[in-house]
Amino acid sequence: MRLKKHPILDVPERKEIRFVYDGNEVSGYEGDTIASALHALGHRVLSRSIKENRARGFYCAIGNCGSCHMIVNDVPNVKTCITRLEPGMIVKSQKGLGRIV
Amino acid sequence: MTEKDLIIIGGGPAGLSAARTALEAGQKVLIVDRNHELGGQLIKQTHKFFGSEKQYAKTRGITIARKLIARLEPFKANLEVALDTTVLGIYKDYVVTTLKGETYGKYRAKAIIVATGASEKVLAFENNDLPGIYGAGAVQTLMNLYGVLPGKEVVMIGSGNIGLIVSYQLMQAGVTVKAVIEAQPRIGGYKVHASKLRRLGVPIMTSTTIKKAFGNDRLEKIQIVGLDESWKEIPGTEQELYADTLCVSVGLAPMHQLLSMAEIRMRCVNELGGIVPEITVDLETSMANVFVCGDVVGVEEASSAMVEGSLAGLEAAAKLGQVHPDYLNRKIEYLNQLESLRCGPFGKKTLCGLERIKVNRNA
Amino acid sequence: MLDKTGIPTPEMVRSCFPVETLLSKPKAIIECYEEIPCNPCETSCPFGAISIGEDINKRPRMDSELCTGCGQCIYSCPGLAIFSVQINGNKARFRVPYEFLPVPEAGEKWLGLNRAGEPICVAEIIKTQIQDRQDKTVVVTVDVDREYMYDFITIRCPYE
């Protein structure tokens, strides 16, 4: 669900960026964060909570709340709401505490 | 350890304005900001701002950000900007530590201006952690910065200026706002914002709050309930509203953490949004040469953030021996502007709060 | 009531209008009922018709005799609280600020809404003004039947 046009903002054409999410090849655009790209694809559940396994999506979108932690290129607890999307990133949902490999 | 004269933490309207006056005074400045670009929250604000011409009234937030950044151009030689850089700590010996990616940095500053702004408060209700429930600022970020629509049908909680403005911006992006819910018996923000929404057919329900959210791994509907004069739920007034997105806009709290860490004297002041530092009229904290400006010293508007920033930059530079060529006039001008912005009914709360944190300068 | 609903009473709306005899020429109407720190309307008026003064929290005062209906205040108000109106026989011609897509086109018939967002009349689009200095606030000239002059406030696109 992307904005195609807006009465105030310019909505420019942007370059597509391919990345992998939970094993599937998907794409976002230049300028996206990982979380915004996933959101545009309809993925709202980004991780699950540590004890109760409750679904987590992002809340604050500016790196304050910690709801958006995912595993990116094997690094856990990445704040996907403020991390720029890069080509070839391997993004996985994080279940519970991150494990430092 | 890198020695710096003046470090400004936060490159939003307050930090950028502080940088400008400090640079004008001949001071070398380092701005550190954890975001990818300068401008703070201004870069998501598509609406025209209030205040007077001096604070860029009738200019859109995104344009104000560009102007504030452009104003630093003439002083490039004395300005350093570190982006994507999070300040991890401020210490009592004026050491400032940072993290950029995996790179750890350590600075010692002669003076510091903390302009870290504020972050959104949360509201406690059952299932408030469901995906699809966002801070109102988050929705603004998604839409205006990344061009992603948050959902199809939104309910906004909170009728303060942020709740009203973001609701309007959602409508502009083609998203339906089903209702604005407000727990108080009155609308919290400017009535002109509320009127704009009512013209669009968006209902504003006062004396109403959210009781519970429902959904299986994502928001599907909410239950709201009426409140009486004592803020108690009125049994039998429960209603269900279908929505795939809920925006929570219940106020901002100053991001005080760096100040608290340095054991600067703080107070909890509700009128200012939370924990704020004690300050002199020059915006200096209890730690000499550490200044504050913007929402971190009281949640207000960008207009006052810019003026406070200008004042903090002036004072910090003077403390370091770089006295602005027009110091006295500027100081009076900034204090007058702040008074002007705060002397109306919306400024009463702020003035009340500021009374509780203003201290006299120690000899 | 404005405090609870965001909608002014009919009396409040009427108090912003000058006597109807003055409306043979277009006049700006400012619906700013609250004291907030703001004064771009005053500074945007080239004819000195709008005054607020030193204390920018004061509500703007409009001198309709001085107003020429030029419309600069319409797109300068950050609250979009200003429009202009002129009586032409059995029609009231409005110029209203508009910040949505699609932008109306001359000749179209749109829905005319009241302050509660309810469609109450037909709004004939006469002209759409988009200039750089308006900074994306479009000003739309609209004709409605004169009987709706105190109720009409904005337009809505009739098609999806």
Image (cartoon, coloured by chain):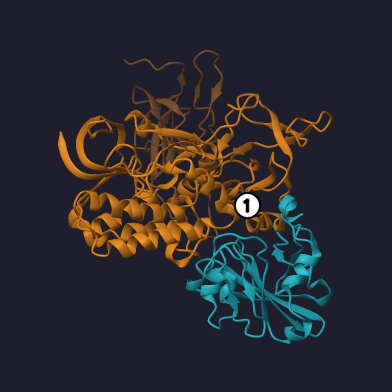
Chain colours: A brown, B orange, C cyan
In the current view of this chain or complex, which residue is farthest to the front?
B363
Can you give x and y, in whole percent of width and height, for residue B326 in the image?
27, 65
Q: Give B146 or C30, whichever is nearer the viewer.
A: C30
Q: Give B124 or B178, whichever is nearer the viewer.
A: B124
| Residue C24 to residue B52: above or below | below
Can you give x and y, in whole percent of width and height, for residue C86 in the image?
72, 81
In the current view of this chain or complex, which residue is farthest to the top?
A51
Can you give x and y, in whole percent of width and height, for residue B322 in the image?
20, 55
Density class for disc 1 (Cα within 10 Å; few <14, some 14-19, many ≥20) is: some
Q: Give C143 or B54, whichever is nearer the viewer.
A: B54
Please say whether residue B334 is visible from this viewpoint.
yes
Q: How many marks?
A: 1
Please say whether residue A10 is visible from this viewpoint.
no
| Residue C130 to residue B108: above or below | below
Specify the amino acid type for callout 1.
Met
Task: Pinpoint the chain carrying mark 1.
Answer: B
Q: Quadrant of the N terminus of chain B?
A: top left
Secondary structure beneath label 1: helix
- Name which residue lies at 54% across and 31% down: A44
Specify the quadrant of the image occupied by residue B314.
Answer: bottom left
Specify the quadrant of the image occupied by residue C160.
Answer: bottom right
| Residue B112 to residue C48: above or below | above
Q: Give B52 or B212, whichever is nearer the viewer.
A: B52
Judge left or right: residue B87 versus residue C106: left
| Residue B171 to residue C128: above or below | above
Q: Quadrant of the C terminus of chain B?
A: top left
Judge left or right: residue B244 versus residue C14: left
Can you give x and y, in whole percent of width and height, for residue B152 in the image?
64, 43
- Name which residue lies at 38% across and 49% down: B281
Q: What residue is disc 1 on?
A: B171
